[in-house]
Amino acid sequence: TSERSNPSGSASVLVASNRGPVSFGTADDGTLTLRRGGGGLVSGLSAIDDPDAVWVCAALSDADRRAAREAPDGRLDRAGHEVGGQAVRMLDIDPETFARAYNGIANSTLWFVHHLLWNTPTAPAFDAGFRTEWQAYTAYNTAFAEALAAEAAPGAAVLVQDYHLSLVPALLRAARPDLRIGHFSHTPWAPPEYLRLLPDDIAEAVLTGVLGADRAGFLTRRWALAFADCCERFLGAEVHREALTVTYAGRTTALGVHGLGADADFLRERAHRPDVDERLATLRAAVGDRRTVVRVDRTELSKNIVRGFLAYRHLLRTRPEWRDRVVHIAFAYPSRTDLAEYRAYTDQVRSLAAEIVAEFGTPDWQPLILHVDDDFPRSLAAYRMADVALVNPIRDGMNLVAKEVPVVSDRGCALVLSREAGAHAELGEDALSVNPYDIVATADALHAGLTMAAEERTDRTKRLAAAATALPPQQWFLDQLNALRPGG
Ligand code: G6P
């Protein structure tokens, strides 16, 4: 039968991402413990009430790999794990291949190229080791494409996420031309002048990989157009910038723009639970009646934490009236610590914070409070009390902190926002925009935020919250799914 010649599964909607909705740890007694993740994709997927939906993700740790191995076909739900509304298939990829693909290519190469992060005199250097990593990235993408091909029902919709999986759309199309395939980039897209730092064959593979999709989605028009520019320049593809389409090798890929918004219902409820109130009381006690500048990020090179601290230091140096009247609360959670660049950056963040405390601190006033452990309720508490939120990435696909703060702010909060964050396209009018490289301008914006009249602050916060929640995660997800449907 046709089923035998073209083996297919029963899932009508599939999502693929490197990081799945759950992760595992090992308890002292050796049993697996499960932890649920958050984020737009998790809330987005909750919008589909489809028993035949499957989420395919990678095992990221030894505990994950064990959970994946112990589950029939890697299906965590079939092993009785509480993974959420849908089925989850976790791929047990061998640790060396995974590390080369995730650390070497996804995070050290593609993340760097899309966020313009290289200091080019020494990096990148595409040596023989890089070629081995690229092979691993191809194998890892192939493992995803094979799992999706096996799980997908005829004509199913598949939503492939992010730069980890840029080869999957083309690989999957080759195996299963019946599927409707979407790809979504949660990052910016590199402009041609930067993408051309990659070896030619790699740049081409990434572009043609994504073009395997029927639709390639981006968080802003700016990133969609950068992708189109690269396709035109490196592949000679035909690009329609108004219609947002790219035609290459006889097929047309539609580009979509879906500006993921904050999940207002979830945030407002979560931000008023007792654990958040407790942390709010602790933070308030530390701050007293001083003003607060708040930032919350992964300790991530693109987040520009060091320049943010330099701007705060410049503020205290040049406007002494703020001494003892403001506290900078900075939460910088560990991220990608397998990479030397991230470890070095973490050290830089810590030592600059210590320098600022040493330069200005008094027995009664700690000018900067830095926490480097992950505590979501504490972040929400800081969001609620912030007078100024500082979001100054060098470049960011969207930046959800910028969207979350106005939603949960208790008394209104001025938002200092980098013009290089995707969120700036939607929030720029009511934020205080900054060039993230300009430390003096950032300090001026902090001052403007700290001195903004209460009424103006409240008005702006209301408009920011409305813009930030215009496209809730559930609708963001459904829009992409609907756009993939025939005639969509
Ligand atoms: C960005 C990426 C996501 C990624 C997240 C956390 O938002 O777009 O794909 O999951 O960072 O990074 P990590 O490497 O910890 O998954």
Image (cartoon, rainbow, N blue to C red):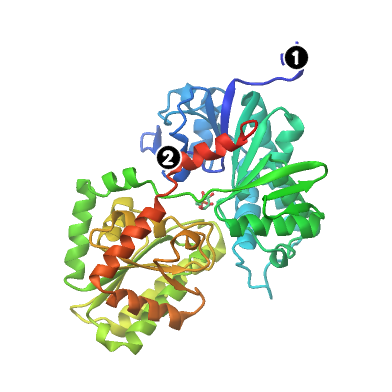
Looking at the rendered structure, the secondary structure element under dot 2 is helix
Q: Position of residue 46 (x, y in %)?
A: 43, 34
| Position of the N terminus by quadrant | top right
- Quadrant of residue 284 within the rendered picture: bottom left
Q: Amino acid at mark 2?
A: Ser
Q: Amino acid at mark 1?
A: Ser
Examine the rendering and report whether any part of residue 24 can be seen. no
Q: Position of residue 58 (x, y in %)?
A: 56, 39
Q: Position of residue 32 (x, y in %)?
A: 41, 33
- Give the camera-side residue of 397 and 335: 397
Is 91 on the left or on the right of 416, as rendered? right
Asked if residue 106 is positioned above or below residue 460 in the image, the reply reads above
Examine the rendering and report whether any part of residue 354 can be seen. yes
Q: Earlier in the sequence, mark 1 or mark 2?
A: 1
Mark 2 packing: few (<14 Cα in 10 Å), some, or many (20+)? Answer: some
Residue drawn at (74%, 20%), measured in percent from left and top? 6
**Residue under circle 1?**
2
Mark 1 packing: few (<14 Cα in 10 Å), some, or many (20+)? Answer: few
Q: Position of residue 217 (x, y in %)?
A: 60, 47
Residue positioned most to the top:
1
- Give the camera-side residue of 255 and 11: 255
Asked if residue 109 is positioned above or below residue 172 in the image, the reply reads below
**Residue under circle 2?**
43
Residue drawn at (75%, 43%), measured in percent from left and top? 252
Label 2 lies in ligand 1 vicinity (Cβ under 8 Å): no
Q: Decide: marks 1, 2 in contact (CB < 8 A)?
A: no
- Give the camera-side residue of 484 and 438: 484
Q: CA distance from mark 1 to mark 2?
A: 36 Å
Looking at the rendered structure, the secondary structure element under dot 1 is helix
Asked if residue 360 is positioned above or below residue 55 in the image, the reply reads below
Residue drawn at (44%, 43%), measured in percent from left and top? 473
Q: Which mark is residue 318?
A: none
